[in-house]
Amino acid sequence: MDMSLYRDLFVSEARNHLSAFSELIVRLEDSPDDSAAIDDLFRHAHSLKGMAATMGFEQVVAIAHLMESQLSRIRSGEFMLLPVLADLLLEGGDTLTRLVSAIEVASDTFEDTSRLTELLAAYDPSGEAGGNLHAEESQEVAITPPQTAVSAPHQFRQADSFKSIRIRTETLDHLVNITGELITNRYRLAESIRLADAVECREPLNQLSALLRNLRDEVFKARMLPFAFIAERFPRLVRDLARKQGKEIQFQLTGKEIELDRGILEEITEPIVHILRNAVDHGLESADERVMAGKPYGGVITLTVRRDKDHVEISITDDGRGMDPEQLKLKAIEKGLISTEHAAQMTSQEAYQLICTPGFSTAATITDISGRGVGMDAVREAVHALSGVLTIQSQCGQGSGFVMRLPITVSIIHALIVECGPFEIAFPLNVVTRTAELNRSDILEESGRTTVILEDIHVPIRSLLQALNLPVTPRAEGALLPIIVCNVGGTQVAFSVDRITGQQEIFVRPLLSPLSYLRGMSGATVTGDGRVLFVADVNTLA
Amino acid sequence: MGRTVMIVDDSLFMRKILRGILAEKGFIVTADAASGIEAMRNLHSSHPDIILLDIILPDSNGLELLESIISACPNSKVVVCSSIGQQPVIQKALDLGAKAFIQKPFTPEKVAEVLESLEA
């Protein structure tokens, strides 16, 4: 019998087992009494062993067998899962993942796994012979690439019945583009019909609109993936970082089932990883510090995903030391990022945003982990690039929270259209909190700042023309001043415009060089009558 | 003894391999199932002569499922399938009425040999 026929199926199914594996180990470490987790782990190891044995992959069989044996001892109550064994099991999972990748490409050579099998076989918490990965070669654990824990999603199980097929992501991107262009064209068609007063075309146009809405919804649905798609790696990441820092951390993840566009999921993974790293490294205190402060020994980090109409909120909170807005301001002044006068006027909310300024770092010592890779400025930029808003909350001594509010889909958005000088500009509705028309008496001028009081809050007013570096034309005496109030990093900023013309669904195209250098603009769209309309990026405008 | 078989295994990989082996050896696979619930449902519609049952399944206790299968379909012969290291469970399965067992990893010949032996 030709076993190679079954290799792809083996690889796909083995990956499913392995991806579940590391998540379960972390879960079990957090709650040792979770007997369902032990049973599941045992079953994954057992199934993998059986499959590998059938295919004749002896190295996989040996490791899976030893892991299964240790799990069976935990299951029978002989001992609890201690971090040393958890490390070994995680390392086992990583090694198996690498072996499976080698099997996938039909490699002739496999890595040497004898040390791991020795340690797994020798592990015994009651005796001295316990195998400790860290004790002997701590470097090796640290360099385990995190991507080995990333798994391929289900492929065969569903495809088996022909109810679903796999589709290239580029194809999905094309579908969005075509749908977007169709929507733009519908607006143009509607405009022509209106101008020609072609009454007989109205009914078909209405039907076309309804069908286009259906098409748009279906195309977007096809691109949606549950948050779980990227979340699998987070418990493991937090756990490994915590171990490395010698901190005890409980990680809670909720809302894995919430769905987002796959493009957004892709872009948001790194920012989440960075915020989690910061929370472990800088947010949470050491166990000693916590006890001194009268807090529980172990810290808690939560990652919560929740849906709010057309948006998704991803929040990451910790119960660590929190941030002091005054210290942040001092540091920013010291680094020459802001002036003393500017600092005095800043709200706490604005002060927290300082950590996202390039060149700012809040930790006295930069650990090897957070010193590397993207900083908070890159996090904020990534969120803005997705037309999202990053809000930071903190309470000194009690912890910090980072909330990323993102649209659930890309490209096709609802926007508020405004006129401003010679331009028409679209504001994504998700950043607009309200609109208003102000009388001259509503507008306050104090110490060079123009503000308006809205619901008891002083909201600064900026002229949109000025923000775009365009000449400002004086307004007629007694004319009302239209403003749109936007949420910029958690603070309200009002932009004054010439006229608010209406709301529209638009298909946003990215700006290419040299237009991409335009400050304050994130994209463009074509209107019904063929004019180009720029899409505002309020974060760089404000 | 007839030659129709139902395969119960949560692994699609295992079900496919077993299908391949059984077809090669002249058996007819009339149904398969990935879970205990599916097994009980398919059992009533297909009434196989032989049931190949993986004793470790995600949604059921394999031994309880074995008992349910035997009482629902007393004329079918159950062959328990499991990886090495599960001898105590296999012994219990045999005590409960399983007719034979196949240990993973298996060769096509071994599978055929065990199933043929049921006919005697």
Image: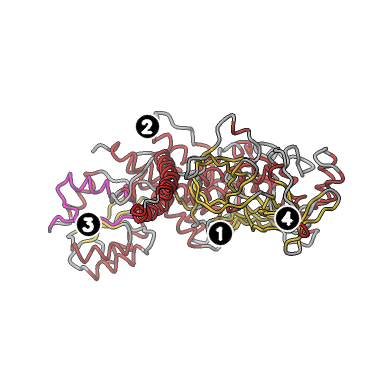
Q: Nearest the camera: A133 or A350?
A: A350
Question: Which residue corresponds to the image point at 85% horizontal and 42% vertical from the top-left?
Answer: A339
Nearer the camera: disc 1 or disc 2: 1
> Residue B106: x, y in percent?
28, 46
Disc 3: which residue: B31
Judge whether residue B14 is colored magenta. Answer: yes
Mark 3 and mark 4, same subunit? no
Nearer the camera: disc 1 or disc 3: 1
Disc 4: which residue: A320
Mark 1 and mark 2, same subunit? yes
Distance, label 2 to label 3, CA atoms, is 32 Å
For the N terminus of chain A, which image quadrant? top left
SS at circle 2: loop
Q: Does residue A403 appear anywhere in the picture?
A: yes
Disc 2: which residue: A106
Q: Nearest the camera: A71 or A27?
A: A27
> Residue A476: x, y in percent?
72, 50
Q: Mark 4 lies on which chain?
A: A
Q: Are marks 1 and 4 in contact (CB under 8 Å)?
A: no
Distance, label 1 to label 2, CA atoms, is 42 Å
Q: Which chain carries label 2?
A: A
